[in-house]
Amino acid sequence: MSRPSLTAGAKRLPAGIRCHGGEESEVAVDGRAFRRALNKSDNYNRSGFGYKKEMLERMEQEYTSDVVKTLRENNNEYTWGDVTVMLAESLGFCWGVERAVQMAYEARKQFPDQKIWVTNEIIHNPTVNDKMESMGMSFIETRGDGSKDFSVVADDNVVVLPAFGASLQEVTMFHDKNVQMVDTTCPWVSKVWDTVDKHKRGQFTSVIHGKYAHEETVATASYAGTYIVVKDMKEAHYVCDYILGGKLDGSSGTREEFLQKFAKAVSKGFDPDRDLEKLGIANQTTMLKGETEMIGKLLERTMMQKFGATSVNEHFMSFNTICDATQERQDAMYALVERPMDLMLVVGGLNSSNTSHLQEIAEHKGIASYWVDEPTRIGPGNRIMHKLYYGELKETEGFLPPGPIRIGVTSGASTPDKVVEDVLNAIFAIKKDMAALQPVA
């Protein structure tokens, strides 16, 4: 059976909303109109190619786990030898991640002979990304300065946009090249784009709670008008203190200091004396739910203090953009850390934002928590190479105590259950060896 042409009859976007240039270009374009027109383009797909059932069955074979299944069937707690495992109520692959991987698998089947590029990691998990490479997909190289080398993409290639989205500039460039795009962007991320578009139309500055260099936040910022990215409550306090002329907590500085502090986290031409009069809150969907809510309330109180309660709606806009899956996994982690345990295992990509916040919850609770991305981080012997919330990669000797232990386990939204099983099997093996070395009474 012949495959569909990648270029024949491709529909072009209306000239009034098209833009040109590479990823670093400043693009004045109506992002909402662009996305609507793109949905009608022949070289763009965001719904798959009709192989969903087949690909989900394949993914179940590759990524599911008998160990996790046993835990689920026993109220999320089960004992193997000296190890009692307590599983978080909600963990692992979320719907958006599963959808993205499924669509990438479908793309490979739909275009078996074409070169397929992924603009970034499809998701933040090394096991899944290695699988993509084994299927003949390639990842577009990121240069040392964070930019990407798109020169490798030929006109007859296929490009897969990852679960956390791609910037407006990137998508426009691919469309202008007439490249076939498969868009796996999570609908929750698209919801945030809709929110910043509303901010832009109302001439509000988007305050994006996120990490300015994270792929999702880069994409969200590209659909915003004027924006500033704040990483946490400390940076939000700085912004609000500046708005109030230093009368909140005195943490802010001069205009020049403000611009230096947020040099990489604001839109081009941002002026804190002009652009902090009307604010809307948005977030990177993987951030801590509670912190996003606190930042939103702080911004609202700040605008009330400056402009008065009766005028607050003219100066502050809020929509709920917190991802359900992120919220469910964080809520499950908060419940899990209340249970008695000897240690916590957090399994997920070391560059995964949502996994980092699961680790953060355990660390703040004072639990010995070990964040790993794959079983090779464990051993040889009773040692583990793990990441701390604030970024340090650390090796710990003797992390497993002798005798019976209780372990809490969770995983990030991009982590297959099979990886959780492989990590637990490494733990079981160490404990078995430790028990064999114990002297016989």
Image (cartoon, grey):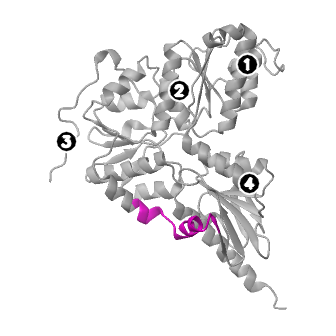
State the separation of the CA atoms marked 1 and 4.
32 Å
Region of the chain picked out in magenta, as a range: 59-77
Q: Which mark is residue 301?
A: 1
Q: Which residue is mark 2?
A: 221
Q: Which residue extends farthest left?
A: 1
For label 4, the SS is loop
Residue 71 on the magenta segment: yes
Asked if the residue under mark 4 is in contact with the one under mark 1, i.e. CB atoms within 8 Å, the reply is: no
Corner quadrant of residue 314: top right
Looking at the image, residue 92 sits to the left or right of residue 249; the answer is left
For label 2, the SS is helix
Label 4 environment density (alpha carbons within 10 Å; few <14, some 14–19, many ≥20):
many
Asked if the residue under mark 2 is in contact with the one under mark 3, i.e. CB atoms within 8 Å, the reply is: no
State the separation of the CA atoms marked 4 and 2.
34 Å
Q: What amino acid is found at the position of numbered circle 1 in the picture?
A: Arg
State the separation of the CA atoms marked 3 and 2.
33 Å
Q: Which residue is mark 4?
A: 337
Asked if the residue under mark 1 is in contact with the one under mark 3, i.e. CB atoms within 8 Å, the reply is: no
Q: Which residue is mark 3?
A: 5
Q: Position of residue 278 (x, y in %)?
A: 62, 13
Looking at the image, residue 191 sits to the left or right of residue 425; the answer is left
For label 3, the SS is loop
